[in-house]
Image (cartoon, rainbow, N blue to C red):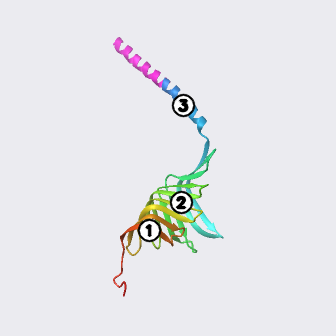
Amino acid sequence: MKRQSIIFSFIVLSMLQMLVSCGEDDLKSATKLTGKINLSSDTTRDVNIIYSDSAKVKGQFFAPILVKVVPMSGASYQEMSKGVKINFLDAQAKVKGSVTSDYAIMKDVEKTATFKRNVVVINEKLTYNTEELVWDQTKKKFFSPKGVITKPDGTVLTAVNFSATEDFNTITWDNGTGEVYVPDNYGQ
């Protein structure tokens, strides 16, 4: 019995020694890391922003979490790690189109917004599905390496090097393949 309690005590002391030594190294590492972090961030939850121009509502922006990161050196950015939804509104403030994604990042200096994972653009003329869509604020255009365009008439196209104006009224792509709907009375 005495031998078992000595062994048990030895095991407990060994474990305590490991824990104490691990804690010291972790604290030293933490001190080194905190000295290297040179940024600040602000987190906002349940973001709902309304955009207007000349007293007319043009859009709504929704994000469960928005983190604004401001590095001590370098450009600031805003990250939406839990996704984003943007509704575009007409003159009567009715939704005329939307962009949704599971992740987005807006870079202030580059004036770009990159939407990633399950990106869906919807308007009255098309639905566009892709894994990455970049909005260039300077060029006032959207760009995507590839995606699928679905039109209301049933046309489905795979588009490579997709680009569109901000309102998605003019779209272009390279190497499109797919199924195109042709009405029965076409050419008559």
For residue 62: magenta? no
Relative placement, left or right, of 13 versus 1 is right
Q: Which secondary structure lies at badge 2?
A: strand
Q: Amino acid at mark 1?
A: Thr
Q: Nearer the viewer, mark 2 or mark 1?
A: 1
Magenta stretch in the rendered image: 1-20
Q: Residue at x 61, y 50 (%)?
A: 76
Spot occupied by residue 2 in the image (x, y as percentages of width and height): 36, 11
Q: Residue at x 59, y 36 (%)?
A: 34
Mark 1 vs mark 3: which is more N-terminal?
3
Q: Quadrant of the N terminus?
A: top left
* Residue that numbered label 1 is attached to: 127
Which residue extends farthest front? 175
Relative placement, left or right, of 147 versus 60 is left
Q: Amino acid at mark 2?
A: Phe
Q: Residue at x 45, y 67 (%)?
A: 173
What is the quadrant of residue 174 in the picture? bottom left
* Residue that numbered label 3 is attached to: 29
Relative placement, left or right, of 178 versus 63 is left
Q: What is the CA distance from the residue labelled 3 to the residue labelled 2? A: 38 Å
Q: Quadrant of the C terminus?
A: bottom left
Q: Amino acid at mark 3?
A: Ser
Q: What is the CA distance from the residue labelled 1 to the residue labelled 3? A: 50 Å
Spot occupied by residue 133 in the image (x, y as percentages of width and height): 49, 60
Asked whether the residues under the numbered discs 2 and 1 touch, taking CB atoms below 8 Å apart as contact, a structural biologist would say no
Which residue extends farthest top? 2
- Magenta span: helix, strand or loop, mainly? helix
